[in-house]
Amino acid sequence: MKIIILTVMVFLTAFSAGLSVSAEIPRGSLGYSPEDRKSVLQQKTEYNRAYWTLFSLIASSAAYAPDDGIEAVYLKSHGWEFEPNRITDGKTTVHFITGKGIMADGKPLYVISFRGSADKKDWAADFVTGQVVYGGKTLEESEKISGSRVGGSEERDAIRAAAKSAGFARPPRVHKGFNSYSDLTLRMLLTSDSYEFLERYRKEKDARLLLTGHSLGGAVATLVGQRLIDFGFDPNRLQVITFGAPAVGNTPFAQMYGVRLDLTRVTNSEDPVPLTLQAVLRNYKQFGKEVRFRIPRTFNNMNHFLHLYLDAGLKNYYTVFDASVKQGIIQKEPDMERNAADKPTVLLFVEGDKPGKKGSHKDVKTAMELLERFILNEYKALFPNYVVVRSPQDPYEAMHTQAADYLLQVKFDAVTNQNNNNWFLTVEQTVSDKNGNVLLADTASRRTSPLAGNILAAMEVIGVQKTELLRQMPWLRNEAE
């Protein structure tokens, strides 16, 4: 038996074509119907918010390591391709990724994901407390109004007058540091002759644009999204989802401009960053729809790490998914799919009892329940024809009954460390043909913890195991291609 202890990221061949929708990312969001009752509309909206939150979490995390990070490789395995971007003016440097994918409904989605604070310059921008006047219908005009270009005094006077007529003593203002990041990004996206990402998006009338980011990245995503709307982009085709992001502007900005932006702010009960500027200064105001996760402080005294948001996002998604199943809005994750008559059938046999060893820490048991579900869905998405059977059933009898061509035995395990929160996620897999010949037997294991990101361990482990399956089963590789 081959044992793989994961210490570096292993590249995974993309195999999005022809997949079932068991895996979370390809599943997509739900459409609406004029016949939907109010309760159905509410549940669909709740499900879509949970889905887009999970997708955006993975995309936001991918921005930190866009080339070979676990999250980026995972998204690539489901057909997504992201391009890393770095732009600087000598004082400010912005890191973000852009990508495009086709969702389950066949419509294209364009994504811009901004990296959060990762070096001293980023943190310096976070702690700049000065504000600049906000406004303008073009990039040049907005830069004049904010003071980064010469001129703009007449425009600023007009903005002050508009704010006064709206009942505000002060004009709309935004964080100076965040605005610098936003302007630099927009110069690349809108004025560079060689960069056509947004131009391609605008030409596809059924496409949507998602902007996302964590911490500083979320603040920049908010400002860039608002600027694009001000510059004429359709607000009905654009949404922003942020994680642990601070406020970007004052009350006049939030009420005069923010009401037009489809913004979802994801926070957690123990993350102080979203409230930092309001706590230090009173001239900042959050806006948009807030989604609040509950993350125990026992994990860390400052629960701002994106990995904590990732695990909470997966848990939230499954909770909403199951509620939607109960209402009959979405189908339960199937334990049987037969989509291709000319392809082999795989019997997926899940060994063992409940995930997590007896005596394991409660947090580990809870995590394992989520991760087993996530990993099993990834296995399901790999095969055009599969049947899931769980112990104590006899796998060989089930294989005969279901006329399966291959038997894939999977065992999940959690090996805990009593001295700290670290533990090992382990997935064993054995593949046999219908004659009982063992074709593959290996184990993939990764050390993890809430701070390291349990879902990242699951992504990496299942990535390695799927790569092994692709190597040993040529017909599966052909199906992927």
Image (cartoon, rainbow, N blue to C red):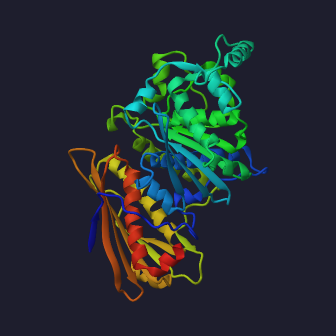
**Image: 315 above or below 251:** below
Which residue occupies 66% across, 37% down? Answer: 228
Which quadrant is home to the N terminus?
Answer: bottom left
Q: How many marks?
A: 0
The location of residue 235, given as percent across then percent down, is 70, 39
Report whether 5 appears left or right of 395: left
Compare residues 352 and 174 and report the one nearer the observer: 174
Q: Picture quarter containing residue 341?
A: bottom right
The location of residue 372, given as percent across then percent down, is 41, 59
**Image: 457 above or below 476:** above
Task: Judge whether residue 282 can be spotted in this image.
Answer: yes
**Image: 124 above or below 384:** above
Report whether 215 appears left or right of 203: left
| Furthest residue in direction right, as rendered | 34
| Furthest residue in direction top, as rendered | 169
**Image: 167 above or below 18:** above
Task: Judge whether residue 391 can be spotted in this image.
Answer: no
| Furthest residue in direction bottom, as rendered | 435
The location of residue 385, given as percent across then percent down, is 54, 76
Compare residues 147 and 299 and report the one nearer the observer: 147
Which residue occupies 65% across, 16% down? Answer: 171
Which residue occupies 49% across, 16% down? Answer: 281
The location of residue 186, given as percent across then percent down, is 60, 37
Q: Picture quarter containing residue 374?
A: bottom left
